[in-house]
């Protein structure tokens, strides 16, 4: 009986070391930088077994300003999406790859092309303004937003990705409720309009690159 237990423990130990070696050999080494070009990104990391190397690019237009940030890291998803209101737009795209240090630069192409779909958006007067949707924004949305005690409604166009994962892409607590629908002007439920500052805050609150 003692010999059997010793043999079993030896087998389990061997199996543990075998699995550890396999996982270590399969782990990808990826660039791990925020806002740096490929030439300046020297920091690397090893991805977990369920992730890939990824380059993520997020571009935010808010009023007359534009913020363009690229992140190189490990990611468990590869997707693209955007949402826009009458005051701006938040776009992101992710490119994944499965070889060591493959997550270099990422291009986005023409992200300002319109797709023909139309949704309502809110200005400081009402929520019946017509907004023309961009590229892959195939849904309309209506969101209740909170900021410093104020609560209002924001509307516009949105991609399917944001509708499927609202809690992972917006900062916790800022978006109280997000409703998506398909069809021109389907987000027509009457509501109080949002202020310009709240709409800008909505655009910059997308928590994709943190």
Image (cartoon, helix red, strand yellow):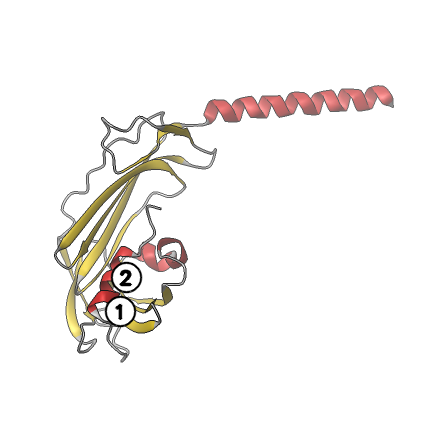
Q: Residue 43 location, x and y as percent?
A: 34, 28
Q: Residues within 10 Å of mark 2 (few under 14, many from 20)?
A: many
Mark 1: secondary structure: strand
Q: Residue 17 location, x and y as percent?
A: 61, 22
Residue displayed at 77% across by 20% down: 7
Q: Are marks 1 and 2 in contact (CB under 8 Å)?
A: yes
Count of numbered labels shown in the rendering = 2
| Residue nearer the viewer, 2 or 89 | 89
The N terminus - image quarter: top right
Q: Residue 102 location, x and y as percent?
A: 31, 28
Task: Judge whether 178 appears above or below 26 on screen.
Answer: below
The picture quadrant where one finds residue 75 is top left
Residue displayed at 40% across by 54% down: 168
Residue under circle 2? 202
Residue under circle 1? 154
Q: Earlier in the sequence, mark 1 or mark 2?
A: 1
| Residue nearer the viewer, 140 or 178 | 178
Q: Residue 189 location, x and y as percent?
A: 28, 78
The picture quadrant where one finds residue 115 is bottom left
State whether residue 85 appears in this view: yes
Residue 195 is marked as none
The picture quadrant where one finds residue 51 is top left
């Amino acid at each position: 009986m003692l010999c059997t237990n010793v043999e079993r423990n030896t087998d389990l130990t061997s199996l543990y070391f075998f699995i550890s070696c396999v996982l270590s050999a399969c782990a990808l080494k990826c660039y791990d930088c925020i806002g740096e070009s490929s030439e300046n990104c020297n920091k690397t990391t090893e991805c977990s077994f369920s992730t890939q190397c990824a380059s993520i690019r997020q571009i935010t237009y808010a009023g007359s300003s534009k913020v363009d940030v690229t992140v190189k890291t490990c990611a468990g998803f590869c997707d693209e999406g955007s949402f826009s209101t009458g005051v701006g737009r938040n776009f992101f795209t992710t490119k994944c790859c499965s070889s060591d240090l493959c997550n270099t630069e990422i291009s986005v192409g023409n992200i300002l092309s319109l797709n023909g779909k139309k949704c309502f958006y809110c200005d400081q007067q009402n929520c019946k303004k017509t907004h023309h949707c961009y590229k892959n924004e195939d849904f309309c949305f209506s969101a209740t937003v909170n900021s410093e005690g104020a609560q209002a409604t924001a509307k516009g166009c949105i991609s399917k990705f944001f509708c499927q994962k609202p809690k992972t892409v917006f900062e916790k607590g800022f978006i109280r409720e997000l409703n998506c629908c398909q069809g021109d002007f389907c987000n027509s439920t009457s509501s109080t309009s949002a202020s310009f500052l709240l709409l800008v805050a909505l655009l910059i609150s997308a928590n994709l690159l943190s």
